[in-house]
Amino acid sequence: MGEKKIDENILQQLNKLEEKYEAMGQDLSSYLDGLLYSDYLTYWDYIHLDTLLSLQSPRTAIPDEKIFILYHQVTELYFRMILNEMEQATFTDPIDEELFQKRLKRINRYLDHLIDSFDVMTDGMDQDQFLAFRMALLPASGFQSAQYRKLEILSTDFKNLLNLEKREELKNVNEIPELYESLYWKAGATELATGKKTLTLKQFESKYGKEFIELGENVKECNLLQKYKDHYEGNEDIISEMKKLDQKANVDWPLQHLKSATRYLQRDPEVIKASGGTNWQKYLPPRRQRIIFYPELWTQEEMQEWGQKFKRVLSSTHA
C-alpha cells in the first residue's frame, strides 16, 4: 500500500504549531506524543458536572434548603458572567462603540434572567421550611455576595455608591479608602437595636474589604461610567443600555429581594432574626437608598421618583 498523502491544510496547521512551540522553546513532537495518548474530552468532564452537583451541602435535613443553595449558586454564576463582560469593557482600551454596546446588552440580558428567576426564591420554597432552615445558616447572608459588590464598583464611581446621608458631606472626597467606609450597603448590615455592625458585615469586610478598595482604585478612571464619559458620551444607543443596566441593577433586582423578604420575614416580628439582624426593611427599598449608577443620564424628576414602584410590589405580595 502506498503512503497516505497528508492533507495540505493539516501540514499548514502543523507548521503553525511548530512555530508556536519553537517561540516558547518547546518541542512540538513531545506535545504530539501526549496528544496520541490523551483521552477524548467529554461534556461532564469539561464542565466538571459531578463536582458541580456535589457542591450542595445543606446544614439541615429540610428539603427546600437544597433549593435555597442551588438558587444562590446559580445567581453567583450569572454574576460571574456579568463580571466577565464588565471586565472586558473596563480593562480593554480602546473598545469600539459597537462592541461596548454589545457587552452592555449581554449584561442586561443576564440581569433579565436573574430578575425573572427570582420567583424561585419568592414562590419556590415552602415558607415554614424556609423559616426553619434559615435560622441554621446564621450569620451567613446573600448580603455577603462579593461578586455583586464588584458589579457595582465596575459600573460606576464610588461616590455614586455612598450612603444617601453621606453624599453631601463627602462630595469633595476622592480617596477610595475613605469613601469605602460610607458605602451604602454597610448601613444595611447594622443591628436594628444598637446600630452596631452585625457579624455578617464584620465577616464580609474582613474577607473582601481590601479587595473592594483595590478594585475601586484600579477602575477609578475606567469603570463603565468613566468609559462612557471618555469615549461614548451622547451615543443614544449606549445611553439606552446604560439606563437599562441602572434600572435593572438598582431598582428591579432589589425589588425582587424586597418582595421575597416581605413574604418570608414580614409576618412575624420575631422572624426578622432570620436575616441576621440586618436592617433589610431600610436597606432593600430602592427609594431609600437612591443608588443610581449614571445620574448624568436621568432627569431630576426621574431620580426623585427612583424606585417608587416598590409600594405596588409590596401590595401584590400581600394580595
Image (cartoon, rainbow, N blue to C red):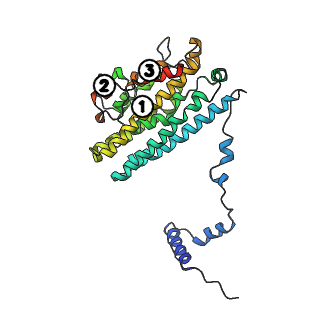
Mark 2 vs 3, N-terminal side: 2
Drawn side of residue 275 relative to residue 92, left or right: right
The answer to which of 60 and 16 lies nearer the viewer is 60
- Name the front one of labels 2 and 1: 1
Residue 189 visible, this orientation: no
Give how far across and how far down residue 265 sits, in percent. Answer: 57, 18
Mark 2 burial class by Cα count in 10 Å: few <14, some 14-19, many 20+: some
Pointer 2 with pointer 1, Cβ within 8 A: no
> Dot 1 lies on which element?
helix
Q: CA distance from mark 3 to mark 1?
A: 16 Å
Give how far across and how far down residue 39 sits, in percent. Answer: 69, 62
Q: Return the residue at label 3.
A: 311
Mark 2 vs 1, N-terminal side: 2
Give how far across and how far down residue 26 sits, in percent. Answer: 55, 68
Q: What residue appears at the point 45 percent right and 46 percent down from the top-left corner? A: 106
Residue lying farthest to the bottom in this orientation: 2
Q: CA distance from mark 2 to mark 1?
A: 21 Å
- Name the front one of labels 3 and 1: 3
Give how far across and how far down residue 241 sits, in percent. Answer: 37, 42
Q: What residue appears at the point 47 percent right and 28 percent down from the top-left corner? A: 254
Residue lying farthest to the front in this orientation: 319
Q: Return the residue at label 2.
A: 170
Q: Return the residue at label 1.
A: 250
Amino acid found under the numbered disc labelled 1: Asn
> Dot 2 lies on which element?
loop
Question: Is 100 situated above or below 135?
Answer: below
> Dot 3 lies on which element?
helix
Q: Looking at the rendering, which quadrant does residue 247 occupy?
A: top left
Q: What residue appears at the point 39 percent right and 29 percent down from the top-left corner? A: 180
Mark 1 burial class by Cα count in 10 Å: few <14, some 14-19, many 20+: many
Amino acid found under the numbered disc labelled 2: Leu
Drawn side of residue 17 relative to residue 89, left or right: right
